[in-house]
Structures are given as C-alpha cells and as structure tokens.
Amino acid sequence: MAETATIPFVEDPTRAPPPVGNQAGAVRICDTTGLPVCTTAQTFIRLNAVMAVVHLLVGGVAALLLVLTRWPAVHLLPADWFYRVLTAHGLNMLIFWIIFMEIGILYFACTTPLNSRLYSKGVAVVSFALMLVGALMVNAMIWTGRSDVLMTSYVPLRAHPAFYLGIILFAVGTLVGVFNFFATLYIAKRDRTYDGSVPLVTFGATAAAIIAVVALLHGAAVYIPAFLWSIDVIQNVDPVAYRVVWWGLGHQSQQINVCAMVSVWYLMGSLTVGSKPLNQAVCRGAFVLYILFINIASAHHLLVDPAVSAGWKIWNTSYAMYLAVLASMIHGFTVPASVEVALRRQGHNRGLFGWLAAAPWRNPGFSGMALSVAIFGFIGGITGVTLGTEQINILAHNTLRIPGHFHATVVGGTSLAFMALSYYVVPLIFQRDYVMPKLARVQPWLFGIGIVLLSFGMSFAGSYGVPRRHWDIEFTGTQLPASFDASVHFWFGVMGIGGILAFTGLLTYILLTVITVFFGEKNEGRPMRAW
Amino acid sequence: MAIHVPPKDWFKAPAGFERVWIGLALVWCLVMFLAMPWWHFKGRQNSTGEAYKVEIPAFAERVNRFVSTYKVGEEAGIPVVQPPPGGEAYLQASMWRWHPILKLKAGQTYRIHMSSTDLQHGFSLQPMNMNFQVLPGYDHVITLTPTAPGTYPILCNEFCGIGHHMMTGRIVVE
C-alpha cells in the first residue's frame, strides 16, 4: 500500500483538545487531519464542487473554441457562434464555476475549522436548487442563441428575459448560501464550539462573504431593472448608471474570488507544509482592507467613460484602489514567508533558497498553490495596477490587454488555487484517493504555464491596439480598411499555444477529478495517500 | 495554523521583515496615489469625462447639420467632413459605422462630440491606440489636438452585435 499522508499540524502537542462541537451525531472525524467534518456540510460541499466542475468543463470547451477563433491562423468559429461562445465562456467560468466552488469553500470554512455543524440543510438545498436552476436558464438562453450579449450585457443590448432572470435566481441562491454561512458562524459562537477568535481561513472566508453580499446587492440593482426593461415594464435603463452599478458587481465579485483564493493559499500552506501565519493581525488586517476599499475601486473600469468626472475616477482609482492593492501586497509576502518559516523549522536551512528547493513540488496541492501565488502576484497584480492607472488605461481600455490581465488573476490565480484545493478536497471530503497521481503532479504546471503564455500573448497583442471581444482583426470586407502591426500574429501564436496547453491542463484536471470521484480508491478508515 | 483558532494574544504589531515590507508597499502606494493626479493635470493627456445628456434624435440632427455644413468630399459612400480649425466636430457611432470621416488640421484643437444612436460602442483610434467609451443618450466631448499628419483608422472595441468587427471609421490629419 502506498505511503499515507501525515498532515504536519496533527502532531502539534501544544494544541489543546477542541471544545465539544454541536454536530449532534452528524459528524465524522477526518482520518487524515483529525478534524471534525459536519456530514451535512460535506454533502453540500460535494454537490457544489461537482456543479463547479461541470460548469468548468462547459467554460473550458468554450475557451478552446475561442482561442482557436481569435488565433487568425485558425479562425475556427463563424462570427455569431464566436460571440455566443464568448458569452457562455464568461458566465460559466467567472460566475458558475467559481461561485459554486466558493459556496463549497464557505460551507467548509464555517464548519470544520469551527467544529460546528452547518446551520441548515434546508437552506443549503434552497441555495443549491436556485443556483442550479439559474445556471441552467442562463446556459439555455445562451446556447439557443437568444442572449448574445456577452458577460456584461451592457444596455441597451438586449437579452431574453429568462437570461436576466436566470442570473437573478443564481444570485439569490448565492445569497441564500451566504446566509447559511453567517448563520453557521452565529450558532458556532452561540454554542461555544471553539474558544477564542475564528481561524484565519474562516476570517478570510467571512471577508469573501461580506464582499459577496455587497456585490450581489449591486447585482440586484442592475439585473432587476434590466429584467423589467426586457419585459417592457420599464422604458429605459440608463447606460451610464448601468455601467457604474454593474461594475460594483463585476469588480467586487472578483474580490470575492481574491478573498477565497487567499484563504485557500493559507489553507494549502497549512495542509501541505504545516505553515502558520507569521502575524495573524497583519493577515486579518489585509482582509479588512479588501472589504473597505474594493468597492469604489471598481471605478477603474470606467476611466474612459463619459459622465463620470475625472475627480471621481482619480480618487477612487488612486486612493481606494491602492489600499486594496496594499492588501494583496501583504498576502503576497505573508503566504510565501509562512511557507519559508515552516520549511526552515523542518530543517531546510541551506542558503537563502534551500527551503524553496526542499518544498514539496511533487505535491500538486503545493505546486498549484505556489504557481497561483506567483502568477496572481507577478503577472495579474502588476498588469492590474498598470491598467488601473488613468494614463495607461486610455491605451488599454477594451483591448486584449484586459483579458490578458484577468486571465492571470482569475484563471492563473483563483482557478489554479481551486484546482490545488481539489487535490485535498477530493481525498478528504469525497474520501477517495486520486487516480494517476503522476499525471496530477504535472497538471498544475501544464495549466499554469499555459495560462502564463496565454496571458502574455493577449497582453502584448493588446498593447498594439487589438480589441478584446472581436471576431476579425483582419477587417475583411469593412467599408474602411484597418490593420495592426504584423507582430500581433506572433503574439496570437503565443496566445494560441498557451491556450491549448492550458486547456490540456484543464481537461487533465477534470478527467482526473471526475474519474477519482467515481472510481478512485476509497480511503475511509485510513489517512489519505501522501502526494 | 491558518485552520486553527489562533492563540489568545494574536493581536500583535507587525515586526521584522514583515514590517519593512508593509512600509515599502505603503510608500509605493503613496507614490502611485500622488503620481496619477499629478500627471492628470501636468500631462493633460486624459479626458475630464465631459459629457451632456442628449436625446438620440437631437444628436443625430446636430450630426446631420454638421455634415451638410462642412462636407468636403465622400469616400466609400461616407461623407468626408472638415470642421473649422479649432471648432466643434461630431462623430456618430451606430451599428456598424463611424459617421462621418473627419478631416482635421495638425496643431489645431478640436472639441469632438461623440455619441451613439443605438447600442454602446467603443471609440478606438489606431495605431496610437486611444480608447473612449461612446454611449447612447450621452454627448461625450473629447478635447483633442492632433499632432502628426496621417490617416488613422477608428475601430469599435465595445461589443455591439453581430457586425461589431465590421465597424470602422477614419480620422485624417493634414
């Protein structure tokens, strides 16, 4: 039998035994970590994770088709299908894959670390059902060609009413799930299932949940009027108001991702090398910065918009945005630093970087997390701050530089962190050991390197003015000619190769995970197999 | 551990390298915070966001009057219009064309009024890559001084339906 995992923190003798939980029988003790798992929460973590991966597959196939269309050497899809698939890609990836996963993370973060049960099974059922129905409605409207409006659905571009209604249902379902999270925090506190402050992972998840509530209220404020307008109840939705409020949703929802991702970084540090935060106050303070300053920072999406004043733009992007950026700078330091301290404590002290060489790079949970930190920080963060600067934004607005940036944050960062998380969620929550561990070791690298190339290709092509969301950069048959510097073809090639690599990595992840969930070796009664 | 309840005395001021890093990051944030507004006024490269609410037919009427007054030619069926140097100029976005072709003089400052008659559009001037949002119901005024003679294509970079990628226009500077 293969070597089983020892999670480094289990042997910590200084840790006091946890107070009694409130799970009343609906609990099992994890055979690997010794932590309590609420079985109701476990069911819904599984359900949400499965739906997340299903939507990841839909969005992933769409991604491949898009890459192969935008790459002029291939130019696969016809124009109508390009915009349709682009709409599907944005919503399935950015909303359905990530938010299903995040609800799973919230259910974990409020139960196991707090030794609590989930507040309500019924509420979890309602949340899951609403989200699923919403996601199905949106997908049905897109794939039948009745809502070719792209992810932003900027008015007066008009989608089928069921498209807006689907998004509203999904958002309400999410809010219901977030309510279940807060209610669980409350009963855990009330029942004294833990002693002292909540763990950092729970704190980060709480930050994500708070931002989610604010973001979803913005969502209600745009999608409800848009829905009413689509059924002719109201005459007109103002395009400026729509954009300002939509980005209160659109940008903040990315900050839910960031909070969830950073919480996952800390969690994976603990699970893979036994790291602990150097200074809890610093880490928590950084989460608070996200909550306080990310909302108005969404002004950087409107830097070249009419009817919002330069003063409003400058204040919200320079003052508010940099305080949110500061938070990421702090996490970008504390996560690697806590890993370094943990590895040095285990005796890996040779030279400045001996600890780095000794890190468990063969563990996809660790390598995925480390790549996520590096890609999010160095590529996503730097491009983000650059593009959010007024003077540079005028050169970059709606060019391919923008997706070049956010594929580094939300794909190379968040999605990769969630993949890394799966390499522990599946063994610990689904209680099955991964099949083909050698392939799993390669997966984060394949995906990460692919995304880096994709991001570079998009960013550099965009710096020559190539628009995002555009079917034909050759401008075949236009009334007036237009063209770009010939070197954009090279960058499209980089993007294309990166996209194919990343899709291969994504498909590997999905196949490994799905096969494991159904056919992987059960590990009930023993610790998970070591990576 | 990040997953365990922290020790009771977790609230501590940052120390050591962590403190140095936070200090450096904060200083850098402050530099950025000052640099952006400073260059907004000093560099004078950014729009102030000047815009006016306008009824779509009223704007279209102003565009028609502008075109008929200053039209100097036609290309590919699109009127070429030369506004008075230093004056007002109009550019109308609609599915899927930029109307009309503008002919400007280098070194003269123009106020260019941009609006849309239908959906949201994205003004993208190439190859210098200058981008603005154009919305229906809003007259977005860009104050602009062309410096180099040449022919500059305009693209649309906001999705506006199935013909979005066919939407091109032109500014000629002489």
Image (cartoon, helix red, strand yellow):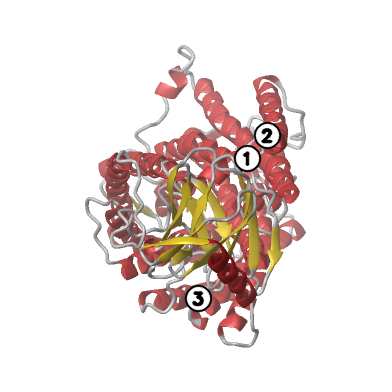
Q: Position of residue A413 (x, y in %)?
A: 48, 44
In the rendered image, which residue does mark 2 sit on?
B39
**Residue B82 visible in the picture:** yes
Q: Quadrant of the C terminus of chain A?
A: top left
Q: Position of residue A421 (x, y in %)?
A: 45, 48
Amino acid under label 2?
Trp
Q: CA distance from mark 2 to mark 3?
A: 45 Å
In the rendered image, which residue does mark 1 sit on?
B45
Amino acid under label 3?
Gly
Q: Secondary structure at mark 3?
A: helix
A95 or A320: nearer the eye?
A320
What is the chain letter for disc 3?
A
Q: CA distance from mark 2 to mark 1?
A: 8 Å
Sequence-earlier tag: 2 or 1: 2
Question: Which residue lies most toward the top here?
Answer: A351
- Crowding at dot 1, Cα within 10 Å, few <14 / some 14-19 / many 20+, comes out as some
What is the chain letter for disc 1?
B
In the rendered image, which residue does mark 3 sit on?
A134
Query: What residue is shown at x 62% (from left), y 68% (from top)?
Result: A239
